[in-house]
Image (cartoon, rainbow, N blue to C red):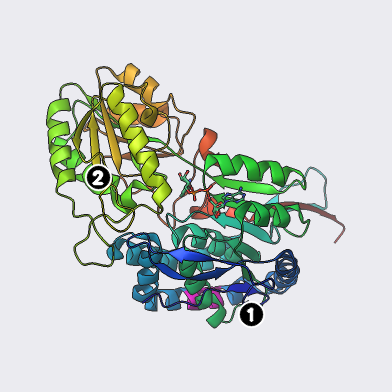
Amino acid sequence: MYDVALKLLINGAWREGSEGKSEPVVNPATGEVLGQLPHASVADLDEALAAAADGFKVWKAMTAQERYVIMSKAADLIEQRKDAIGRILTLENGKPLAESVGEVQFAADATRWYAEEGKRAYGRIVPARIPGVRQIVLKEPVGPVLAFAAWNFPASNVIRKISGALGAGCSIIVKPAEETPGTAIALTQCFVEAGLPAGVIGIVFGVPGEVSSHLIASPVAKKVSLTGSTQVGKVLQRLAATTVKRTTMELGGHAPVIVFEDADLDNAVNTLAMFKFRNAGQVCTSPTRFYVHESLYDRFVEGFAQRTAALKVGNGIDAGTQMGPMIAERRLAVMVELVEDAKAKGARVLTGGARIEGAGYFFAPTVLADVPDTARIMSEEPFGPIAPITRFSSYDEVIERANSSPYGLASFIFTQSLATAAKAEGDLNAGLVGVNHMVVSTAETPFGGVNESGFGSESGIEGLDAFLRTKFVTERGI
Ligand code: NAD
């Protein structure tokens, strides 16, 4: 059962939109409607902005210790409810229940981590050139924040923004993705029950372009944080420029994975087969361009295709499911186009390659071998369960090909040579580099991209800093 009341949170109260507009939320595994999601009217958005301004004053005036107490209570509630919230997440997003519950656990961990880290928003004292002068660098919360988040990680995309902002002493208005609203609502309810003052978190939904242009035009908010596509990132940056708001942009990716000649082949095959199809490949750090050294190529391709073909695809709620559906029907057509284009350019389909007929939006886990660099999938972010594989022969060649994309989020290498690893870590144009494994996101480590994958980090001390501003104070004769 989809056990969540779909509402807006404005000034501490869960309510419907004032104009009565709404849209259906759909279970991608079945196509069934889970509930109706209210849309915020312009008047509702203005109320949310006013509440965020008031909430900011209250939250900023509290001590970091007082904020810590409320946030850690919220983290405890999230953890206690992780099975129930994980179920909501799977129903609206489709991913297997174990992945959902793990993601909600991440939300609890990140909230706890930021609750603590908020106590360490240290400034510094800088020795002065003038006798009797004391120079102080202060860190202050930046102000009310506007956050927009994608549906692929309905818990962690939202919580990194909420907990980062709250830990720093900011209020926040979040527009979670309309595809996956229930997870954000259930998480936010934990903060409300933990005693968060009204207005510190607002949750709104609507037509994304309309909501964002209205909220961002307001001078109330001082920061915009987006997790979404590069295309939308460019739109939001332009909007933010009109009131000179600072931004954090967590955008698209097209992660290369390089399997070098001296890689542990079994580890590479097993690790990649497990991570590639997580969340049906709808992950911004998902490996999407496989460059395998020619000496290992045939063995890698065979092992990887075998592992992929054995994946159990189905409804994420069912025990044993390893891969769920894609988020929406329109995404299936994109997958078909990418496969057909690669085939026309000479790629071989080793497994999958087509929609799985029946209810829901399922696409078979797909392995394409001998994919030329000219295939669209080698330059367009697939955001789906397709692994395109190609061979390479030299280090310089593969680094150049890996760096040929305008994106620069994650990159992965498999090698047993420390020298190769160290060189590639430096040479890859990416914000994240995984060597012999794929875990590039934790609460305490910075996460973010370069180039058209965006800028600014979430998580880690950098994630707190993103919600702080710097003030210089110089005192004499005190
Ligand atoms: P999207 O950009 O369409 O949507 C992201 C968010 O922006 C959602 O809340 C959406 O409602 C909102 N939005 C959409 N159009 C908007 C508009 N015109 N104005 C304002 N807001 C708008 O992205 P998506 O397709 O939902 O998500 C997939 C993309 O997100 C992929 O490119 C993926 O790589 C990226 N992503 C990046 C990260 C990261 O941390 N770098 C993490 C997850 C997803």
Q: Nearer the viewer, residue 105 or 96?
A: 96
* Quarter of the image with the C terminus in it: bottom right
x and y percentages locating residue 191 in the rendered image: 54, 76
- Is 269 contained in the magenta span? no
Q: In front: mark 2 or mark 1?
A: 2
Q: Is residue 478 left or right of residue 430?
A: right
Determine which quarter of the picture holds residue 304: top left
Q: Is residue 70 magenta?
A: yes
Q: CA distance from mark 2 to mark 1?
A: 43 Å
Residue 103 % position (x, y): 37, 62
Within 10 Å of the Cα at label 1, are there few (<14), some (14-19), or many (20+) other Cα atoms? few
Query: In the drawing, does residue 476 fall left or right of residue 42?
Result: right
Which of the numbered marks, if any, corresponds to residue 365? 2
Element carrying mark 1: strand
Residue 144: x and y in percent read: 69, 62
Chain-order first, disc 2 or disc 1: 1
| Residue 298 appears in the figure | yes
Q: In the picture, which quadrant includes the N terminus?
A: bottom left
Q: Amino acid at mark 2?
A: Pro
Q: Quadrant of residue 45?
A: bottom right
Residue at 14% across, 48% down: 310
Instruction: Check disc 1 and report the residue beneath it.
Output: 13
Range of residues picked out in magenta: 68-74
Q: Nearer the viewer, residue 200 or 328?
A: 328
At x 42%, y 45%, the residue is 284
